[in-house]
Amino acid sequence: MVVSTPHSVDPTPVPPSVPKSVPESVAVVVAALAQHEYLADEGLATAIFLSLSLHRPLFLEGEAGVGKTEVAKVLSRWLGGRLIRLQCYEGIDSAQAVYEWDYARQLLHLRTAEATGEVAGSTSAALETELYDPRFLIRRPLLEALSPTEGPPPVLLIDEIDRADDEFEAFLLEALSDYSITIPELGTIKAAVPPMVVLTSNRTRDVHDALKRRCLYHWVEHPGFDREVEIVRLRAPGVGEGLARQVAAAVEAMRGYGLYKPPGVAESIDWALSLAALGRSTMDDATVQATLGTVLKYREDQDRVAQRGVHELVRAAVERGQA
């Protein structure tokens, strides 16, 4: 980490060094992710490969439940860097995301200095310098990700950036452009080795172009039928092939119903595990009706499936599962 004082000028900024452990090809990325139980298609694997090769932040957008957040978790396990997660929400600001001063410790330090007589003869400037010491700095996820660390650089997950306010995006621009953060009392803190950055968005609102331009972009789709079967079998090894195919077929059909919250991959896995826990090796109307809450989390969506016909859904899923 390089710290420049508030009055110092760096006329020739030096780009951060790039880690040497860059995968050799997209195929290596696909294989590595699969080893950590994430089955990525070629498009996503290519985006990850380029993000690692060019050391650019990766912006993943798509519907909830398609596995965007899981990408950062898998990258952390694969690359060996610590996962640092910044969960965005409405009203988040720099105090929660970047840093804040520990005012309680600063006040305690000042009172201790007064009690011991250390304050006598000290100028106000000297006292201020002492109070705004890094030991009183509370590092939030963004600053923590830029701090020095042993071993591989961390993976910084900025999750659901679309939930944050427009103003918050401005706090990210400096960090993502040159991996630095300015603290008025200390100066500019710049990472010697930048983290791997993954941003996710469910597209509840459009993220500004200025932020997207600093990232490599990829839209994450729901997996196709065959890939979803593979994912369910991988993440729920106790589920049989036939049941996994039926679950994937039923979920694929429900995603075409125009639901308020279409089921994601996580719901597919939970549903398959639930059916297996009930001792089912194949779907039936009664069990599907009883377990809809595992895969559909809104009453309106369950009603819509009921209107379309649970029996028809099960029949079609069983037929496709046998194909």
Image (cartoon, rainbow, N blue to C red):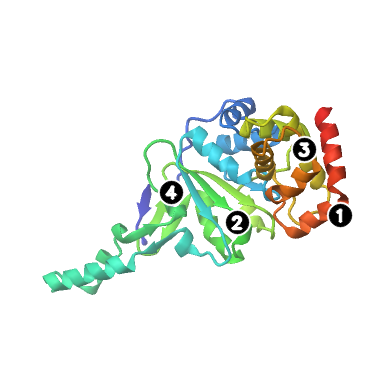
Hey, what amino acid is under mark 4? Answer: Leu
Task: In the rendered structure, find residue 8 and report the number of the disc placed on it.
Answer: none
Give the mark toward the camera: 2 or 3: 3
Residue at (45, 44) in percent of width and height? 14
Disc 1 to disc 3, C-alpha distance: 19 Å
- Disc number lying in front (1 or 3): 3
Of mark 1 and mark 3, the one earlier in the sequence is 3
Q: Amino acid at mark 1?
A: Gln
In-image side of 7 versus 317 (left or right)? left
Residue nearest the viewer, comparing 288 with 26: 288
Asked which secondary structure carries label 4, the reply is helix
Distance (Cα) linking label 4 and label 3:
50 Å
Any part of residue 30 in sight: yes
Residue depth check, mark 4 versus mark 3: number of the one nearer the observer: 3
Residue 220 in the figure: left or right of residue 3: right
Q: Residue at x 56, y 28 (%)?
A: 23
Label drawn at residue 161: 2
The reply to whether dot 4 and dot 3 touch (C-beta < 8 Å) is no
Label 1 secondary element = helix
What is the spatial separation of the Cα atoms under label 2 and label 4, in whole angstroms?
A: 19 Å
Which numbered disc, 4 or 1, marks the residue that appears first in the sequence? 4
Between discs 4 and 3, the one toward the N terminus: 4
Q: Is residue 19 placed above or below 220 in the rendered structure? A: above
Q: Position of residue 112 (x, y in %)?
A: 18, 69
- Give the foreground label among 4 and 1: 1
Mark-to-mark CA distance, 4 and 1: 52 Å
Tag 2: residue type?
Ile
- Tell me the tag on residue 283: 3
Per the rendering, the mark at residue 307 is: 1
- The residue that disc 4 covers is 146
